[in-house]
Amino acid sequence: MHEKLLDTSSWKPFMDGLDLEQSYRIHVPCYSANLVNPDKPKECVKGSKWVPTASVTMGGSTADEQVTLNTFDNFHRQQTTEPHHLPQVNNSCPENGPKPCVLQGLTVSENYYTKFDDLPDTGFFMQAAYEIKSKMLSRQKVQYAAGHTDADF
């Protein structure tokens, strides 16, 4: 029985989830005043690994499937108004331009944990983020940047 508890392979899905969210319990978020957080992996993490995957789903597939979306997430507090952090597309693909084309973008997110964060880890309260607040690019913005100006929404 105790050997089974020590088998770390059963923890892999849990640890993978914490890695995707870039758990604040494991990593310190950067929270820079700039839209793009500094690249200081030994000090803090820039953003969530989950949000870029969700952004591809949110942006939708392109008609010709030769345009891909590559976003970089940045941790910022969502209530921040000065400076105002919003997602953006950094380039566009011409409608009849060369393919394949890669759209580069930025997203913004913040992990939210429950009010029970300061309690001892008894196994009763969740360890993962309760919510990942994300500001992602809209499907319309992605499709227009991909060169599909006639996309129907």
Image (cartoon, rainbow, N blue to C red):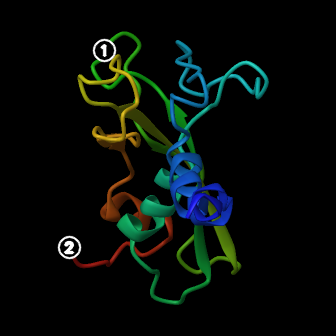
Q: Which disc is residue 27 wearing?
A: none
Q: Assign a secondary structure to mark 2.
A: loop
Q: In this view, does 42 lie above or below 6?
A: above
Q: Where's residue 55, x and y in %?
A: 44, 59
Q: In this view, does 140 lie to the left or right of 90?
A: left
Foreground: 4 or 13? 4
The residue wearing badge 1 is 81
The residue at which mark 2 appears reads as: 153
10 relative position to 117: left or right:
right
| Camera-nearest residue between 122 and 138 | 122
Q: Residue at x 35, y 16 (%)?
A: 118
Q: Which residue is drawn at 36% across and 65% down?
A: 58
Q: Is residue 9 left or right of residue 139?
A: right
Quarter where residue 69 is shown: bottom right
Q: Nearer the viewer, mark 2 or mark 1?
A: 1
Task: Sort mark 2 into few (<14), some (14-19) or many (20+) by Cα contacts within 10 Å.
Answer: few
